[in-house]
Structure formats: structure tokens, C-alpha cells
Amino acid sequence: MPRKNEPTTRSCIVTREAMPSDELIRFVLDPEGQVVPDLRHRLPGRGVWVTARADMVATAEKKRLFGRGFKAEVKVEPGLAARVETLLEEAALGAISFARKAGEIVTGFAKVETAIARDPVVGLVQATEAAGDGRSKIEAALKRRFGRADAVPIIRIFRSEQLDLALGRSNVIHAALLAGRASENVIERVAALARFLGEDGLVGIGDDGRAIEPPEVPETNAPDAGALPAGQKTE
């Protein structure tokens, strides 16, 4: 009998390996026999499981493993992996939007730099097109506060236009996630998307997909945010 809080394991229909269910994607059949993803593991009916990576989902589709897993005639609309990617991306961006509503995210270069210096920052978001100079200054701020640049997860997987829509403002390049459940959900959702794509979209994430804990910094030792150099952009 599994211990309390022990992850439930399921077998991937591609690799046949037993893995924790949070490392797999569950699929079910809709009333028409179409294979659909169940990312939250809540849909009714029999489910089959695939390792949560795009190449594994594509292999399951190509080799027609869903029919074998369900032991039935099934329909798989071409491009299943791409649809899963879209759902994971929407979930991650939706989590970012919710974090804004929960008051757990700040945007703008100056506010992010200030937050790193004095607030309980648990993660950063940087648009993929963020300039090297801005990224270097943010890393320097992290080093001043925590002693290393990868002290908190840094999300670099979304374009500025995607962040604009999620956060309800324009030209978002830098944002900081503040301590709270909504921010934790952002990190979890983005980590799931990054693992699925096999991309290095996160810095400061361990092999298990969980955030690396930043070192404790006494409040009295937190440096003052200081003034920004003249001409410094806020994004």
C-alpha cells in the first residue's frame, strides 16, 4: 500500500517504464473515441499514460500505441504532440496571468531589480528577446543578494508579446515572481512545458523539475536597491 503523499506510479505505453504520474501525461477517449489529453488527471474513464515529452507523444501516435493501450479502436487526430504543447503553454501563461491578479508578480526592469534586493523573490521571467546587457545586470543583482546568479528559477521560454497578453501590459521584458502559491504554480507549469519541449527554458531548476531553494539572506543584510543609472529603461 503506498505511503501517504507518495507519488502514484503509472506505466508509459511507449517505454513500458513505471514512473510517477506527474512525469507522465494522461490520455482518455472522448465519446467519439478520439484520444484527448487530460493534463489535470481529472477526466472520467480509462486512461493511458505517456512520458511527458513531445517525442514520446509523437512516438505513441506514430506507432499507434494508443489503440493497444486502450484495447480498442481509437482515433488520433494528426499533430497530437503539438496540441499538448499548446495546452501546456496556455496553462503556463494562464498561471502567470493569475500570479499578476494575486499580486505575486512585478514587471519592469527597475522594479525587478528593486525586488531582488529586498523582496521574497522566488523566480524571474525574462522574454526570449531580452538583451544581454539587461540579463547581465539582473544576474549581478542576484549575485549581490544570494551569492549566485542561478539562485532562483529564471524563465526564458516566452516571447514579449506572449507576456504582454498574460500580464495585461505592453513591452514586458523582465518580471519577478514573489513568494506565494500562485508563483509556485507558475514555476511548476513552466517546468512542465520546458520538460515536454526538451528545452533549456529554465535556469535554476533541478533535474526533478523543482525549483532550487535560494540561500537564506538575513533582512538586515539585504542591500539597498539603490538608484538606477541615468537613462536606464524600465523594461
Image (cartoon, grey):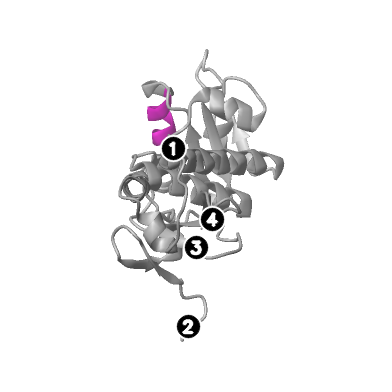
Q: How many marks?
A: 4
Which residue is at a point 58% across and 48% down the rendered structure image? 183
- The answer to whether residue 147 shows anywhere in this view is no
* Residue type of the residue flagged with mark 2: Arg
Magenta residue span: 134-141
SS assignment for the magenta stretch, majority? helix
Q: Magenta segment: does it hold 136?
A: yes
Label 2 vs 4, first from the N-terminus:
2
Location of residue 61 with respect to 8 vertically, above or below: above
Residue 20 at x, y = what percent? 41, 66
Q: In the rendering, which numbered label is found on residue 82?
A: 1
Q: In the rendering, which numbered label is found on residue 47?
A: 3
Are the residues tagged 1 and 2 within 8 Å (C-beta)?
A: no
Q: Nearer the viewer, residue 49 or 128?
A: 49
Circle 2 or circle 4, nearest the eye = 4
The kind of secondary structure element at disc 1 is: helix
Label 1 vs 3, first from the N-terminus:
3
Circle 1 or circle 3, nearest the eye = 3
Quarter of the image holding residue 97?
top right
Are the residues tagged 2 and 4 within 8 Å (C-beta)?
A: no
Q: Which residue is mark 2?
A: 3
Q: Magenta segment: does it hold 105?
A: no
Circle 1 or circle 4, nearest the eye = 4
Location of residue 98 with respect to 171 vertically, above or below: below
The kind of secondary structure element at disc 3 is: loop
The kind of secondary structure element at disc 2 is: loop
Label 1 vs 2, first from the N-terminus:
2
* Residue type of the residue flagged with mark 1: Ala
